[in-house]
Structure formats: C-alpha cells, structure tokens
Amino acid sequence: LSEKLNQAFKRLRSKGRLKEEDIKEAMREVRLALLEADVNFKVARDFVKAVTEKAVGKEVLESLTPAQQVIKIVRDEMTELMGSTNARINFSSKKPTIIMMCGLQGSGKTTHSAKLARHFRQEGKRPLLVACDVYRPAAIEQLKVVGAKVETPVFEMGQGDPVKIAEESLKYAKDYGYDPVILDTAGRLHIDEELMNELRAIKARVQPHEILLVVDAMVGQDSVNVASSFDEALGIDGVILTKLDGDTRGGAALSVRAVTGKPIKFVGTGEKLEDLEPFYPDRMASRILGMGDVLTLIEKAQTEMDEKAAIKTAQRLKENKFDMTDLLEQMKQVKNMGPLSQVLGMIPGLQGKLRDEDTQRGERELQRMEAIINSMTLRERERPDIINPSRKRRIAAGSGTSVEEVNRLLKQFRQMQQMMKQLAPKKGKRRPRMGFP
Ligand code: GDP
Ligand code: MG
C-alpha cells in the first residue's frame, strides 16, 4: 500500500504542460499499437498526426503522467472517431423494417443474421430470416439450421432469383406480421461486379431500411478495401464486425470507420448465436491500444472518487484526524467503482491471472471490515483506542465476526494511520487522491 501511495504522490508532483518529447514518446507506443492491431497504415498515420497536433500544450491532469495523458487523449480521440455513442438499427415506421446483410463469403453473414434474429426476439419482436444466398443448397440449409436454433422462421424459395425471393418475402412478412425481415445474401471470396450488381438489384427492388456490412475483423488491413467497395456500390448504413473473440486487436474497426464514416453497430464475439454485443467505441479503443482497460480504471477512479470526500479526507489527514469513519468512506468509494473482480481485472498484467477465489476473498474481507466499522459507535470510530475487550466482544457480535477479526482491523487501521502521518502533505494546496489497497 505504501508504495502505491508513494507513486500516486509522485505523479501528483509531475504537473505541468505536455511537452513535445512526452508526446513523441507516447506516440511511438501508439503508432506501434495501431499497426500491431492491423489498423490500415494510412489511417494510422493520419490519426497520429491529428492527435499530435491536439496534444501539444495541453495541461497534464494531476493524476496522470504525461505519457499516460497523451494516451488518454489518443483514446478519447479514437473513441470519438469510432462514434461516441453506440449506434442502433434504424427501424421503419412502416412495417416491416427490412435489414439487408452483405459482405464477403465467410465473413459471418448467415451466422449474424441469426444472431440478430435472436437479439430482436429478445426484444419481443417477430423477425423473419430470408435465404437470398441461392448459389449453394448448403447455404439455405445452414440458414435453416441456425434459424431453428433461434426459433425464427426462414423464408426460402430454393435456388431461385434472389431479387424475386426478397420481394416475395416482404409480402409474406406483411401477411403474417413478421418484423423485421433479415435478408441473408450471397458473398464472394473477392469483390466482383457480378455480386455487386446482384446486391444493387435487391436493394433497388426492396429498398432496405438498413444495409449492414458484415466484416471479419481478422482480415485486418484488407477491411479498408472491402468496406469502401461495398459502401461505394451500395451505400451501407452500418457495420457488424465479426470474429472479435480471438486475439484480433480489432484495428479493422478504426479503419472501416475512418474510410466509410459509417458506424459499427454490433460485434460478433464467437460462433455461438448468443455471441453478439452492441459496439462500444471506448472499449474498442482500449482494445486497439492494447492496454487492458487501464484508462477506464483511471477515469473511473476520477469520477467515482467523490471530489468533496477527497477534499475532506485531505483536510482530515492534514489535521491528523483520519478515523474509522473516514476509512469506511474510503471503502465505500472503492466499492462504488464496481465489483472488486472487475476493478482488479482492469489492471493490465492481472488480466486472466486473477483467480476468482482471490477476488472473492478480497471482497468478503472488505465486507467484513465494513460490517465491523458499522457496528462501532461514532465515538469508537473516532477514538479506536477506547475499544476495550468488552467493546470488542460487542462489536464482534454485532457484525457477525470474531474478536480476532476486530483486532486485526484495529491493527491494520493503526498501521494505516501511521503511514498516513508520514505521507500527509505538510503544507500547500495540493489535493491528494487517496488510494486504498
Ligand atoms: P457467411 O459466408 O458470410 O454467411 O459466413 P458464415 O455465417 O457462414 O460464417 C463463416 C464461419 O465463421 C462459420 O464457421 C461461423 O461459425 C464462423 N463465425 C461467424 N461469426 C463468428 C464469430 O463472431 N466468431 C467466430 N469465432 N466465428 C464466427
Ligand atoms: Mg452465408
């Protein structure tokens, strides 16, 4: 704990403005991260340039080092670029809403048609899947299999004309009250005019409300060409980025968004039909930069730590009055940041290494400490030295713990007080941010 506090105080002192070399240092990391994440190199270059200009001369937040601050600017900028809010499907006021899925072969159109159907069913809608990929009988069969799994009917007319099938499916949907209609179209291994012409013909005939491009996140650099070709030919409304479950960093998200300007609406995170998530630009930015959720953690700490409480704590520290009530307050603030497992899981390096039992033990420990303090009178909290054996027994009974546990907490508190005395700022207006183990 003392080391953590020391570090925190050190950071406090490195205030000032961002200097050119801070930015250069951080930008090297950022550029590498982008390329490693398979962001298209032109997109990466433009992005880094734009951010560098923004970063020069910015004030350094007191809780971050300059390099962290630059990365925070990068992340904010990237979040902004990828769309600050998560986008939704355009629903038509006239039923049914028509959603057309398009993309290269193997990108995940059929799978994600079914995932979307499942998603809509959960919202209480009655979707209809339509088999417009007519070139292989197996494709129709595949749609029927996944359709059955998500309890959604599949409209098919065998290997007929896809334009006609799309049109007929609308009549069917109107007659039987299905909404939305999801068109699963054919793909090709590469972009070709024949495919684009077919998709254009379907679009012209049924005028979909939403054309979704399905992009495999693993194609990396190529995603830029795929996205721009489809967008030029069809005018897409949004993107579903699939196969984000592997160790792909998701650079395609940034590239696709940068070249088309169209929002990413969902991400596919596995082969199972429940593996569909709304797109969160901030999470994707962290993923691309490969820093776990460390900045989320920093931001959380900044917003959740109630400013007033922090000032009060600082004041009490200065006056050497930090007592059990303050400790309780600190614990509550840690709790406000989320479940301990989640908070710890955001620290890079700890990810995946934390055993559930460890965090559970930590959480139970925090709960016990809280219960013990809650069972103390205000006077006891202010002056723990008055807690004699009979008071200890009362507190233990009241909190459902043991006298040993009460003793342990008292000992920990004394050590903490000792340490805080050493760390308390001697003078000045500096506002310390408290950490808690
Ligand atoms: P389509 O040719 O565009 O219709 O693509 P499919 O829906 O048939 O998917 C191609 C392959 O990718 C199948 O084996 C799917 O199981 C797999 N797939 C689709 N989406 C995902 C995903 O999000 N994660 C993973 N791991 N596999 C996926
Ligand atoms: Mg398919």
Image (cartoon, rainbow, N blue to C red):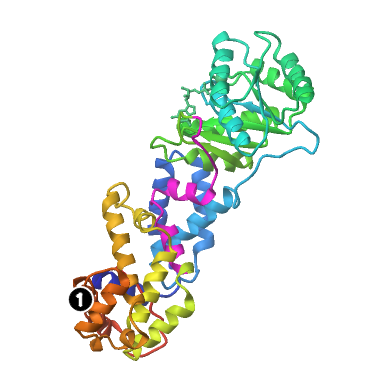
Q: Which residue is mark 1?
A: 407
The CB of the residue at mark 1 lies under 8 Å from ligand 1 = no
Q: Is residue 71 left or right of residue 187?
A: left
Q: In the picture, which quadrant includes the N terminus?
A: bottom left
Q: Is residue 366 magenta?
A: no
* Front residue of 415 and 293: 415
**x 71%, y 11%: residue:** 161
Q: In the picture, which quadrant includes the C terminus?
A: bottom left
Q: Position of residue 338 (x, y in %)?
A: 43, 60
* Front residue of 110 and 49: 110
Q: Position of residue 139 (x, y in %)?
A: 56, 14
Q: Is residue 220 left or right of residue 397?
A: right
* Front residue of 62 and 322: 322
* Magenta extent: 273-302
Res 112 → quadrant? top right
* Front residue of 431 and 123: 123
Q: Position of residue 333 (x, y in %)?
A: 42, 70
Residue 219 visible somewhere in the drawing = yes
